[in-house]
Image (tube, rainbow, N blue to C red):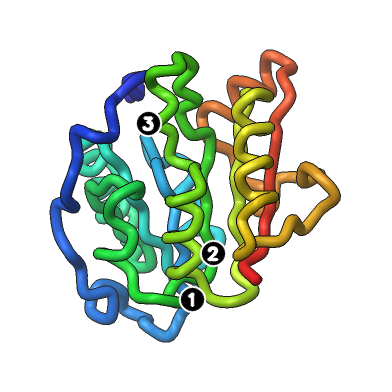
Amino acid sequence: MRAHPHYNPFNVREPAEYPDWTKVFARTEQPLDLEIGFSTGRWLIQYAKTFPERNIAGLEIRAKFIEHVRGKLTAENLANAYVLQANAATALRKLFAPQSLSRGIIMFPDPWYKPRHLKRRVINPKFLTELAECLVSGAELHIATDQQNLAEAMLADLATAPEYQNKYARYAPENFAGLMTDIELYNLKCGRKIYRLVFVRC
């Protein structure tokens, strides 16, 4: 299943639903993590299997992937994962209470190269502030990209955000979960560098 490379996030203004997270997961006492832009769901499904002691919510703007991943989660009986259609840039505060998220994950966001499209990038100062409100103190934000220019732009935004502190001097040295997306597998096969950022919520 392939992802459309350029899907305007502003086509999704409101979340398709507003889940009561205390009723979504069988074990509500577990930490709640969030993956933004899970695409085909390869990474999210692996994460749910690898960390059964954690719950994970996934946001995606492309409806076809919601149906696809929900089917996978049901087939594999993964009760610690839930996905829905929502634009993270406009929906975080509507979906998650303050200090309710224990980890944030953004794997290979669309770089949006053209200057007129930069506003479509998910990571910007406003988004980082809103995400920080949802993260508990000490929560880690994990980001990966294969685009150096995007990595540097995200690094600059995070470095000036007072709510976050870089866990490393610059880029993270390794894949924190040992799990790979389709994009990461392809890039590693081609010998391309992966840029990883890990910032901690102060």
For the residue pair 59 and 47, the one nearer the viewer reads as 59
Image coordinates of residue 1 in percent, x first then y, are 33, 25
Q: Which residue is mark 3?
A: 120
Question: Quadrant of the rendered structure where residue 118 is?
Answer: top left
Residue found 81% across the figure and 53% down from its top: 168
Secondary structure of the residue carrying tag 2 is: strand
Query: Mark 3 is on which residue type?
Result: Arg
Residue found 23% across the figure and 47% down from its top: 85
Image coordinates of residue 106 in percent, x first then y, are 51, 45
Residue found 24% across the figure and 35% down from its top: 10
Q: Earlier in the sequence, mark 1 or mark 3?
A: 1
Residue found 37% across the figure and 35% down from its top: 40
Query: Mark 2 is on which residue type?
Result: Arg
Label 3 packing within 10 angstroms: few (<14), some (14-19), many (20+):
some
- The numbered disc on residue 103 is 2
Mark 2 to mark 3 CA distance (whole Å): 23 Å
Tag 2 near tag 3, CB within 8 Å: no
For the residue pair 27 and 74, the one nearer the viewer reads as 27
Is the C terminus in the top left, top right, bottom left or bottom right quadrant?
A: bottom right
- Residue 58 versus residue 97 in the image, above or below: above
Q: Earlier in the sequence, mark 2 or mark 3?
A: 2
Q: Which residue is mark 1?
A: 31
Mark 1 to mark 3 CA distance (whole Å): 29 Å
Secondary structure of the residue carrying tag 1 is: loop
For the residue pair 36 and 42, the one nearer the viewer reads as 36
1 or 3: mark nearer the eye: 3
Q: Earlier in the sequence, mark 2 or mark 1?
A: 1
Tag 2 near tag 1, CB within 8 Å: yes
Badge count? 3
- Residue 4 versus residue 46 in the image, above or below: above
Image coordinates of residue 154 in percent, x first then y, are 61, 39
